[in-house]
Amino acid sequence: MSPTTRRPINIPVRVEPAVRPVHTHDHAHADGDCCAPTDMAQPPAAPQAAPTGSEKVRFQIDKMDCPTEERLIRNRLEPMPGVVRLDFNLLSRELTVFHKLPDTQGLQAALTELDMAPRVMSEDQAPEPLPQALPLDMQLQLALAGLAALGAEYVDWTSPRGQGWIMAMLAALAVALRGGPTLKKGWIALRHGTLNIYFLMSLAVTGAVAIGKWSEAAMVIVLFAVAEAIEAVSLERARKAIQSLSALAPDQASVMRQGQWQTCPVAEVQAHERILIRTGERVPLDAQVLQGRAAVNEAPITGESMPVDKLPGDALYAGTILADGVLEAKVTATAGHRTLDRIAAAIQGAQSQRAPTQRFVDQFARYYTPAVVMLAALVAALGPWLVGGGAFHWFYQALVLLVIACPCALVVSTPVTVVSGLANAARLGILIKGGAYLEQGRLIKAVALDKTGTLTEGRPVLTDVVALNRFNAQNALRLAASLDQHSRHPIAQALVAAWRERDPHGVLAPVEQFDVVAGRGVSGRIDDQPWQLGNHRLVEELGLCSHELEARLDTLEMQGKTAFVLLDSEGPVAILAMADVVRPESREAISALKRLGVQPTMLTGDNQAAALHIAQQIGIEDVRAHLLPDDKLRAMEELIKQHQAVAMVGDGVNDAPALARATIGMAMGAAGTATALETADVAIMDDDPRKVAQFIRLSQATSAVLKQNITMALLIKAVFLALALAGQATLWMAVFADMGASLLVVFNGLRLLRLKP
């Protein structure tokens, strides 16, 4: 059977995940062979390509646990000759250096000099598990240091002057317990000309001790240590949110070896081995179903809450759960190359790329901190002359000003917020490839959507069976399916599947002398009678296209359907129509975009009638049809010129030029498709177009939280700056305010983990 008609209404078959064959057919031919599937077993791609001519070395740095250390390392390594680029991953405490150096000993020596304790990692080595952010011994030290600092404050307030040595001893104990790391890092920062939080705190503590404010020096150290500990725990929480993705897959798998099922570590299972998954178990590796039928919960990968029925030939993704049934499957991706691993790797790479707000904050802090240090020096030097009062008083206020100047709350707010947004998106089945895209999503004013496979199911479905005279519809469908059972074309197979669904216990008629009429249809003899199933063109060439039949075919074709006619020796007996049906979620997806003020546009290679028919069903007014890939690219350029920020939603392969040109390219149904995962800016893991609006809402929420964090941090600092200049602030109050601001922005950023857009 050929789907070509006098008015060609194509039903393209979209590219499927690689574990299923990818069918690409010329619709002028009645049959065709399958193309080779793409290879799923590819390692996760790096977030950015290596600079030309450079080599790379990876370091794991256990002592790099916040953006302050990142800035210190940047200031030390970036000026080194031969260093091309630095990529940081704070969550896994990993640094990748792209360089043109004869060896990496100088890099390792520089990191060691910064007391970062670097360890060189091999190309494919996974980062070692990180130690607990707040182990028991550190908790005890913090508790003892806190008690000592509070005791020093109490003695200072209540005891006579002769007991100052008690206060000094308690304060010294507090500093000894938790001050060492801070003072050491402050000294390293001073040696390398970096005015960071550790330098400012060290300067404040040293100055307080120098003027006899022992109790306040102890309180500064303790409060700062508490703030660091809570920030570390918060970052650990964000880290675990991402690591939990990889942990979804089990460590063991039931593998067929030596004629029996054996339990083996997942890391030892090879591609193409047979595995068994039972009800309630998680799928250990990406695989293709060989035997059995089961409902599978794919929420860990796609975010889809409803179970999906799996049949032989369907794809299974590691980490998904069998709700019922038992499946035998063939492994298609080994440990480390699973879709789940690629998702986790993509998020890790995404959070290592600094978002625009983070780059702004880094630049702001670079100038802000020296400016406040200069202001503190002026306060200490000019305060007694301009305002009056002793030098001791103004030196103390300058120390308070230094503590207030710490940009910690500003610097830590952006990475925590961005990572939380990325992790939440992954839970929803939306893989965002960088903080920049997470922020840019809120700017989207128009979304261009491919039709086939994005707004529609992407597969032909039988929609009409119209009996013309001598046969009823069921008999006509059986005869048409009998002819089509010998064709390998996807549309023919869809017609056979439709008959089996309507008559599961029926038997198709045997066909003799089956033949393909190129570009027109198929023919054969059933019960010694000649039958033909063909398109509009075949009927016209046979001279059997009456006015009534012509009108019916025109009506179906204007609805975007591909019509076929079943004929016997006497003429047409039935009309059958196929169409690519609209996804149930598409109308809701378009409505959601419109509520956000985003204009949806359909870009499709189908003809205008088919495109308009689909667009009217889902509510799209701007329809552009008959587009080749270059035409889609030009349409995208027009939309960008009109709306500035435009997203393109497609399958990640056929729409490549438009996806690349769009402000944000979004690949649909990316689960299991290595190409889409590696090339798209945003990959929607299932085929739900509603997630386009969810992505925009999450981007808006992330942007709002970032603005809230920056506003809160600057407002708190402004208030205490005014108090310091008025001589009303104390050192421990300043540290408490800085710690409070840091915790506020961290906890506010972590709210995105629970957001349901």
Image (tube, rainbow, N blue to C red):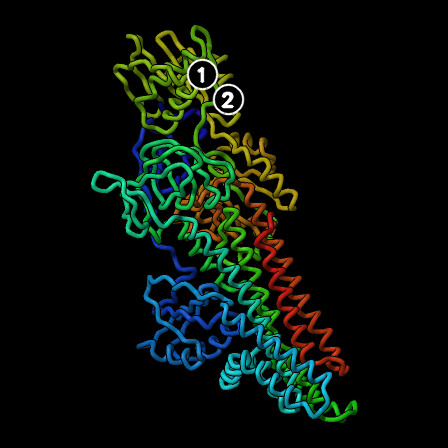
Three-letter code, disc 1: Ile
- Residue 397: x %, y % from top left: 70, 85
* Residue at the right extreme of this rendering: 388
Image point (45%, 23%), residue name: 462
Report the disc number at residue 265.
Answer: none
* In this rendering, position of residue 439 left or right of residue 284: right
Q: Quadrant of residue 32?
A: top left
In the image, residue 185 sits, relative to residue 132, either above or below, namely: below
Image point (42%, 71%), residue name: 61
- Check the picture and name the quadrant holding the N terminus: top left
In the image, residue 481 sits, relative to residue 218, either above or below, namely: above
- Residue 200: x %, y % from top left: 59, 81
- Residue 564: x %, y % from top left: 42, 20
**SS class of the residue under badge 1?**
strand
* In this rendering, position of residue 739 left or right of residue 297: right
Q: Residues within 10 Å of mark 2 (few under 14, many from 20)?
A: some
**SS class of the residue under badge 2?**
helix
Question: Which residue in the protein does label 1 denote?
Answer: 575
Image point (47%, 48%), residue name: 683
Three-letter code, disc 2: Leu
* In this rendering, position of residue 339 left or right of residue 442: left
Q: Earlier in the sequence, mark 1 or mark 2?
A: 2
State the CA–CA distance, disc 1 to disc 2. 10 Å
